[in-house]
Image (cartoon, rainbow, N blue to C red):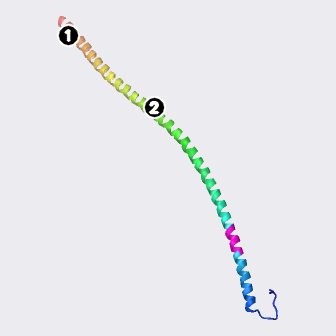
Amino acid sequence: MSYLPSDEPATQADLASTTSQMTAKIDQVRSDLTAQIDRVRSDLTGQIDLVRSDLTAQIDLVRSELSGQIETLTGRVDALDHRMERFEDKLDGFHEALLTQGRTYMISTLGSVISVAGIVVAITRLL
């Protein structure tokens, strides 16, 4: 069979032969393309798995670094909270002492004023 035009018309056998050849070529191209798609798919799957494992490792590293920093900051915040509680206790004690000192000052001032007033009254009565 020839692909060049001829004077003779194509027979049923020629058409069957050409159809089987074309079907064989189509099947060959289909199998080649399927093999290439499978190779590309497996390559991509391998690359995706590699990237996924790299990202997972980086995420774990960042997570561990952040966990350490969070623990450090939590410790600092707890220490500051404890210091603030101690400061509030000291401030409460200072406030009580200041109130006591103010009362004592008022009582002693009042006593002094009454004493001076008593002396002034006594002196004015003597004169």
Q: Return the x and y of residue 53 as percentages of the image width and height.
A: 60, 51
Q: Nearer the viewer, residue 78 or 27?
A: 27
Above or below, 110 against 25 in this view is: above
Q: Quadrant of residue 62?
A: top right
Image quadrant occupied by the C terminus: top left
Q: Residue at x 17, y 7 (%)?
A: 125
Can you tell which mark lies on residue 79? 2
Which residue corresponds to the image point at 52% horizontal and 41% vertical from the top-left?
67
- Residue at the far front: name it: 13
Query: Crowding near pointer 2: few (<14 within 10 Å), some, many (20+)?
Result: few
Tell me the residue that label 1 is attached to. Answer: 121
Viewer-side label of 2, 1: 2
Which residue is at the far left? 125
User: Considering the numbered disc 1 on the image, is that residue within a helix, a strand or a loop?
Assistant: helix
Q: Nearer the viewer, residue 62 or 51?
A: 51
Is 18 or 6 nearer to us in this picture?
A: 18
Give 123 or 73, whichever is nearer the viewer.
73
The region drawn magenta spans: 28-35
Q: Is residue 108 above or below residue 52?
A: above
> Residue at 77% of width from left, 94% of height from top?
9
Query: SS for tag 2?
Result: helix
Q: Position of residue 18 (x, y in %)?
A: 74, 85
CB-based contact (under 8 Å), mark 2 and mark 1? no
Q: Is residue 119 left or right of residue 30?
A: left
User: In the displayed structure, would residue 88 be above or below residue 4?
Assistant: above
**Badge 1 amino acid:** Val
Q: Quadrant of the N terminus?
A: bottom right
From the viewer's perspective, tell me whether residue 108 is left or right of residue 54. Answer: left
Label 2 vs 1, first from the N-terminus: 2
Q: Amino acid at mark 2?
A: Ala
